[in-house]
């Protein structure tokens, strides 16, 4: 996996399929394609597995990936941020800079973002994390499967439901 830089977020690029994720001009790409899916994940291997799942359901070109909570909040709440809201946010809890629970708190307490479906997809099976996530407004709480096959299947099912089947609020 290789990073493709940008301010406030990181584009991940899979080396095995470079043509899918190579953009000559980041701003040109963003102006044509607002993301339907926001992934907030700091583990590069998990990101690769997520992209594998998104490729299977033909949504790999509709995703924006952030490596920490600070980046996603800067993107969501930036002045002049996109009018179109994402269809779903997949949020890890264990993030650098600003943790996932604080990110969830800010997303769900803001009038502009509170209706975005937010799925906590985490390695934490702690009852306290699950309970707090739901109290803060998480739409779902899923513990990441340990096997590669089940991980990819879970991501494909989550995103397929929230981004393709669910009818959004607005």
Image: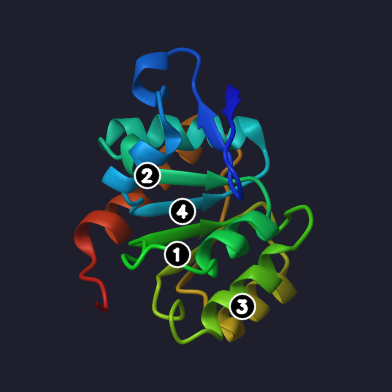
- Out of 74 and 58, give the one closest to the viewer: 74
Q: CA distance from mark 2 to mark 4?
A: 13 Å
Residue 163, by quadrant, is bottom left
How far is mark 4 from mark 3, CA to CA? 15 Å
Closer to the camera in the image, 32 or 96:
32
Judged by depth in the image, the label closer to the viewer, 2 or 4, is 2
Residue 123 visible? The answer is yes
Which quadrant of the figure contains the N terminus?
Answer: top right
- 1 or 3: mark nearer the eye: 1
Q: Earlier in the sequence, mark 1 or mark 3?
A: 1
Indicate whether 66 appears above or below 139.
Answer: above
x and y percent of residue 30 in the render?
37, 44
Looking at marks 2 and 1 on the same chain, the residue that comes earlier in the sequence is marked by 2
Is 115 left or right of 108, judged from the image as shown?
left
Q: Position of residue 159 (x, y in %)?
A: 35, 51
Name the residue that disc number 2 marks.
30
| Residue beneath disc 4 | 38
């Amino acid at each position: 996996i290789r990073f493709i830089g940008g301010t406030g977020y990181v584009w991940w690029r899979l080396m095995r399929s470079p043509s899918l994720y190579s953009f000559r001009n980041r701003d040109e790409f963003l102006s044509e394609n607002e993301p339907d899916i926001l992934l907030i994940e700091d583990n590069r291997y998990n990101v690769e597995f997520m992209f594998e799942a998104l490729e299977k359901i033909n949504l790999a070109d509709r995703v924006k990936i952030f490596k920490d909570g600070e980046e996603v909040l800067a993107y969501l709440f930036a002045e002049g941020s996109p009018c179109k809201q994402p269809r779903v946010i997949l949020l890890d809890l264990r993030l650098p800079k600003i943790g996932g629970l604080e990110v969830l708190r800010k997303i769900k307490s803001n009038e502009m973002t509170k209706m975005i479906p937010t799925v906590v997809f985490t390695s934490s099976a702690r009852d306290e994390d699950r309970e707090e996530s739901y109290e803060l407004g998480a739409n779902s709480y899923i513990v990441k499967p340990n096997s590669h096959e089940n991980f990819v299947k879970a991501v494909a099912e989550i995103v397929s439901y929230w981004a393709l089947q669910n009818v959004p609020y607005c």
